[in-house]
Amino acid sequence: MRTLILYQSFTGNTEKVTRKIAETLELEGLTPKVVKITEKTGIELYDYNLIFLGTPVIELLPARPVLKFIRSQLAIHRKRGDIIPSSPKIPGKYAVCYCTYSGPHTGKREAIPAMKYMEQFFEHLRFTVLAEWYIVGELKRNEILSTQGPLGDTRGRPNEKDLSRVERMVKNVLLNQVR
């Protein structure tokens, strides 16, 4: 199974999760290609059976490089005719979307729009979206918001407990969904 992990990270939160996903996939016998999304990321998504897409949530949306990547991919796939009415799923094409968020104002609800945006991207490409993972991360530039928001003290997150949960979620996807 060809596996790809696409991600963006500014403060290291999403990168920590990405490393745990890659490590877990490797322990399960897969060799994921890991790509940090930049302005020039070009990749053929249909070459992969399982794609993980991760981003920090910034102002309710995926990070700007992820937004640009999604928009450029949609343009490519529209032009090629890959996006068709009713979006029938392509067998053997799966996606998992994940994000790190702090939610200093309303918690997880701040991250939901970003996740739905990424899921819709994959659904337009006719991938089956297997999961959406929300992982709390530290808001590193504001200690007050990292300690007094609705999520409590988020300093140091994602922590080992969060990353253990990520490991279990990866194994669950592999065991119950794609193998």
Image: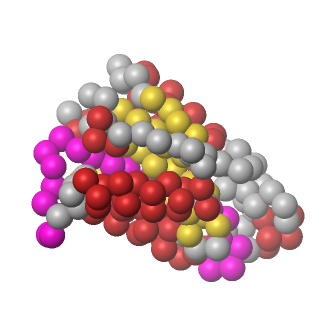
Where on the picture, by quarter, is residue 159? Answer: top right
User: In the picture shown, does residue 175 fall above or below 61?
Assistant: above
- The answer to if 125 sits in the magenta stretch is no
Q: Is residue 145 left or right of residue 26?
A: right
Q: Of 148 and 76, which appears nearest the observer?
A: 76
Quarter of the C terminus within the rendering: top left
**Rendered location of residue 161, percent (x, y):** 59, 44
Say which residue appears at 41% left-offset and 36% top-offset.
4
**Rendered location of residue 122, percent (x, y):** 32, 57
Q: Which residues are magenta?
A: 85-106
**Rendered location of residue 121, percent (x, y):** 36, 62
User: In the picture shown, does residue 121 fall above or below 20?
Assistant: below
Say which residue appears at 15% left-offset and 49% top-offset.
90
Q: Is residue 176 left or right of residue 42?
A: left
Q: Is residue 127 left or right of residue 159?
A: left
Where on the picture, by quarter, is residue 72? Answer: bottom left
User: In the picture shown, does residue 62 fall above or below 113?
Assistant: above
The kind of secondary structure the magenta stretch mainly shows is loop
Say which residue appears at 73% left-offset and 57% top-offset.
138
Say which residue appears at 13% left-offset and 60% top-offset.
88
Q: Of 137 and 69, which appears nearest the observer?
A: 69
